[in-house]
Image (cartoon, grey):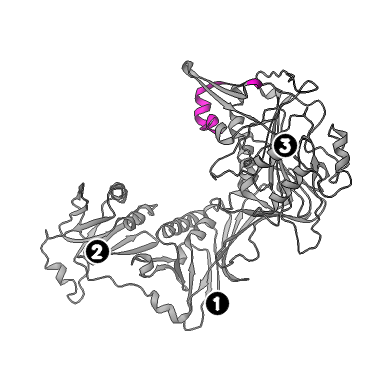
Amino acid sequence: MKLALRSVNSSRSAYAYIFFSSMFFQHYCWTAVSQPCQKEKQLSLPCKLLIKSVLPVFRCVNVLERNVEKCSIYTNTNEHHITFQLLCRNGVIKTYNLTFQECDPLQAVFAKHMCPNILKVHSRLLADIMIHFPTSQEEVTLSVTPMKVCFRSYAEEDADFSKTMLTEIQLNPDEFDYFQVGVDSEVTFCLKELRGLLAFSEATHGPVSIHFDVSGRPVAFSIEDMVLEASFILATLSDIDNGTASQEPLCCSRIPESSKAFMDKSENSSMDKDGNAEAAASKRPRQNENEHNTEPAAPASPVAKRNTCNSGNILKDLEGTAMPETDGQAVLEAESRESQYHKFQFLFFGAVSPKKDAISHTSHSLATASDTEEDFGNMQSSQVL
Amino acid sequence: MRFRAKIVDLACLNNFSRVVNTIARLAKTCTLRLTADKLYFILCDKVANGGVSMWCELCQGNFFDEFQMEGVAADHNEIYLELTPENLSRALKTAQSAKAVKIKLTNKHCPCLKVSVELPSLSSSSRIVTHDIPVKVIPRRLWNDFREPRVPDFDVSIYLPALKTMKSVVERMKNLSHSIVIEANLNGEMNLKIETDLVSVTTHFKNLGNPPWASEDGCQSSAQDRDLESMAEARIDIKKLQQLLAGQQVNPTKALCNIVSKRIVHFILLHEDVSLQYFIPALA
């Protein structure tokens, strides 16, 4: 049983998820409710919330830590409400009722275990590295050989070198808790999208794992401990000059309805706010943990041949094809191309349900971008019901 | 043209960072002049700067453990570079615990000051952070633009009040008005005044003391004959004054200003190893 939060950015170049196991919470309860229109008992109801609505609930972590004794989250599917209740000192209770909308969950699938390059580093070290880059630095290149690791700021070829300051940090493999380099590679990703995870990792004090491959393939930054698992999967610049720009799409995963996955618009999550409420959290959401494994990171190989999804018939569509087939995915691609990261390898997403209207609804929602830069972490609360 | 320098001592590094931070607050772009003995940060009084000019002088020996420089030519053994001090400030910011900082003039794609910071790390070899700061080499024919400004023929010279106090006064005044009047006399009195339609505020400082300037051929005679109570005043842009005061991170050994009535205010801030002169012209 777990609570899954997922988010994707508007250009579809960054996907984040955070799973909180039921052990994270003081109390955790989910009851499946069957809807009259559905054939089988509904094990999950994917829904989305506006990040801008949820953030104010958890703003000001310091205030939260001092005042909030308990945080209670519950929902009633009939009313399409999720209620966040903060029980504070002195009998003050703050209740936030947020309307959710149903949506089709998506997930990017990325075979972390298949990555030839894996680095594990303490969160402190990662923070110490990234601090050398100005906050305005958009993209950063991570370059590895078995002998050294280098992070440097990335500037486009047509950038004005006489104006931009370039920063480079060289590290010895010794500094990493775990260092595996199967293939020399240079991956360029968006540092801005990662800041959320960096902040979260400092709060959780856990080691951060970096899984990556050659340029063009995504890079995953993950944190895992006993009660939670977080991962930010970022698209990387593909090396077009090299000619090996493989356009192999990532696994497109159709998440069966019984799964807990759902996806929405907006930017990456930073879970530090939730993370800090951990001592106080007492949740009673209606949740379902998908018995079947739909770990987004689990799938075996990039192109099709996936056996993690339940809906076997959907898989057949994907097998052996380089391009996703459904309308929903085609729409996503088209939108992706217009994005500013035109050279970035996109993460391909799979729509969940075969329903056409649901798909178009999804692509609609994915197009919305978040405006504020200073949203420290746009936390997406994903409730699976 | 060659330049390389190295700082190993943390205290020197901190000092140098502080100077660079101060400069970064005062100018978006400025000129760095390197000679065998000294470094200068220069801002000349172009209209783009709002007419302010700056001259900051450091003895390289007080900061650098190694300093090697070869100018453009043997008889002009100097280098003039145009740079954005904010970049240098940023590069030094994260070098707080560095084992060594090296600065070198390079020319790969374009001329750069390469700042290499060697940081301690848990592993056997250090962590190395390099920053390539783009610079422009200023050709010799333009060097005349950057000569040391003369001390103007001032009417009054006076020591400044405690910078911290002056800063907080000016900051509050900044919210009310765009310009501020500085007036002072040879009796150690200074007033900071603002006046708008709604409000006028004056802060009075007393017993500040007037620095003794050695008289040179009577050029100070105008000052010496002056009535002690008579105020010399100049109205200047308050933001410029606020920037100057806000940029001071350490209290100077000596801080004074020379006022040329209705023309210009010349600030001199002296520290042990660095001197800063800042000119703010009077508003029309």
Note whether residue A356 is visible: yes
A323 left or right of B208 in image: right
Few, some or many residues within 10 Å of mark 1 (<14, 14–19, 20+): few
- Callout 3: 10 Å neighbours few (<14), some, many (20+)? few
Q: Quadrant of the C terminus of chain A?
A: top right
Which residue lies under the disc numbered 3? A357
In depth, the one of A15 and B28 nearer the eye is: A15
Q: CA distance from mark 1 to mark 2?
A: 38 Å
| Cβ–Cβ under 8 Å for marks 1 and 2 | no
Instruction: Tell me residue A218's x, y (percent).
Output: 75, 48
Residue contact between numbered discs 3 and 1, judged by CB atoms under 8 Å? no
Q: CA distance from mark 3 to mark 2?
A: 76 Å
Choose mark 3 or mark 1, whichever is in front: 3
Task: Return the residue at label 1.
Answer: B1
Q: Secondary structure at mark 2?
A: strand
Q: Quadrant of residue A25?
A: top right
Residue B238, horizontal then vertical, whole percent: 30, 55
Q: Which residues are magenta?
A: A55-78
Q: Earlier in the sequence, mark 1 or mark 2?
A: 1
**Magenta stretch contains residue A63:** yes
